[in-house]
Amino acid sequence: MIIAEDKPIRKNEGERYITIYIKDPQIKKRVSKAISEAQIAFKDLLLYIPKKKYDIWQNPLYVWEAITFCISNKKTFPAWLLNYLTEAGGNLLKATKTGTDKGNPETVSDAFGFNLGKGRSPFTNYLTTEKYIEVALAALKIIKNIKNGKIRKLRNQSFNEIVA
């Protein structure tokens, strides 16, 4: 016998959770395993996103986004993060051994890939890229709503109403 109870998580945000009561221990074990596997797959997907962004834009802030995610979720660093850290550490040690550092803070930012060239800041680049992604996702949602017939007249609706 399975009993499901639907409850709100936060009243303002509309998020919900379901409490499931399962008496049969075999079914309970299978359901628990399936939920655990789904959670692991979801976390792997969440780690894939900053990697793809890093591959496309070569902004080291996406690497640090992934590092923070791994640490806060107690996940093992994937090979691409370890490669980045190994390369950055090697760059720092090389600068120290050759004496090229001389206390220059740019040596550290160079070692970690933060100098994107031509006066481009990785921080500004990161914010701009995230805004572009947000706009692109909103545009895709508008196109989907138009195709599904949910939007007929764009003039009479605000952007927030269309995207909602």
Image (cartoon, helix red, strand yellow):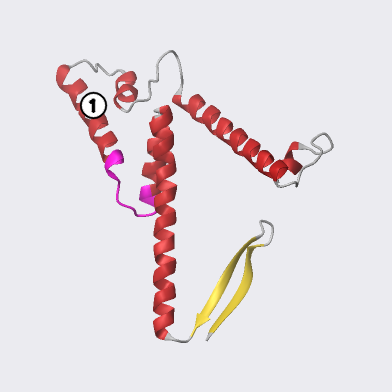
Between 124 and 143, the one lying in front of the other is 143
Q: Which residue is mark 1?
A: 92
22 shown above or below 123: below
Q: Can residue 163 be seen in the rendering of this structure?
A: no
Q: Residue furthest right?
A: 156
Q: Residue at x 40, y 16 (%)?
A: 117
Between 143 and 84, the one lying in front of the other is 143
Between 164 and 16, the one lying in front of the other is 164
Q: Residue at x 42, y 39 (%)?
A: 50
Residue 137 in picture, x, y percent from top left: 60, 38
Residue 142 in picture, x, y percent from top left: 69, 39
Q: Residue furthest left?
A: 97
Q: Can residue 116 be seen in the rendering of this structure?
A: yes
Magenta-highlighted residues: 70-81
Q: Secondary structure at mark 1?
A: helix
Question: Position of 40 compared to 124: left or right?
Answer: left
Residue 157 in picture, x, y percent from top left: 81, 39
Q: Is residue 75 magenta?
A: yes
- Amino acid residing under circle 1: Leu
Question: Position of 151 compared to 54: left or right?
Answer: right
Q: Residue at x 57, y 30 (%)?
A: 132
The picture quadrant where one finds residue 3 is bottom right
21 shown above or below 66: below
Q: Is residue 46 magenta?
A: no
The picture quadrant where one finds residue 40 is bottom left
Count residues near mark 1 (Cα–Cα under 10 Å), then give few for <14, some for 14-19, many for 20+.
Answer: some
The picture quadrant where one finds residue 14 is bottom right
Residue 46 in picture, x, y percent from top left: 44, 48
Between 21 and 106, the one lying in front of the other is 21
Q: Residue at x 39, y 42 (%)?
A: 66
